[in-house]
Image: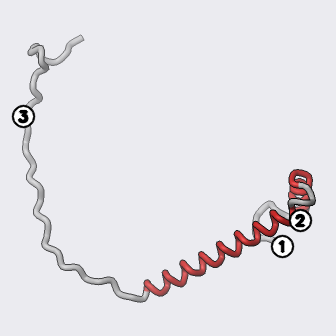
Amino acid sequence: MFDIPGLGVPELILLLVLALIIFGPGKLPDIGRSLGRAINEFKAASTEVTREYRGEGSEPLPVVDAAPLEPASVQETGPPAPDQAGDGPIQR
């Protein structure tokens, strides 16, 4: 019936009974209507994105001519300076 593994008819009935107990019979139609609208909006948005992707995918990308970058200069450093006290590294 559904492609969700582990979710069969008994599980769906249990979920519907729990929803009826939690939300009550007055709120279930409103919740179902809101859920249906959300699913329809998601389908419309995903269809629009798919159409835009397929439309832009057929156009070739523009070629950009750019000058090659020069490598940054690296300065070599000497040994670390002694600490401010002047007595070198801390020994324990």
From the viewer's perspective, tell me whether residue 68 is left or right of residue 5. left
Whichever of labels 3 and 2 marks the residue nearer the N terminus, that label is 2
Q: Point out residue 56 in the picture as x, y percentages from the top left corner.
A: 43, 84
- The Cα–Cα distance between marks 3 and 2, rounded to whole angstroms, is 74 Å
- The Cα–Cα distance between marks 2 and 1, rounded to whole angstroms, is 8 Å
Seen as rendered, the residue at the extreme top is: 92
For the N terminus, the image quarter is: bottom right
Instruction: Tell which of 59 and 33 is nearer to you.
Output: 33
CB under 8 Å between callouts 1 and 3?
A: no
Picture layout, residue 76 above or below residue 81: below
Picture layout, residue 22 above or below residue 40: above
Q: In this figure, which residue is indicated by the disc labeled 3? A: 78
Dot 2: what SS?
A: helix
Instruction: Tell which of 22 and 11 is nearer to you.
Output: 22
Picture layout, residue 9 above or below residue 44: above
Disc 2 marks a residue whose amino acid type is Val
Q: Residues within 10 Å of mark 2 (few under 14, many from 20)?
A: few
Disc 3 marks a residue whose amino acid type is Gly
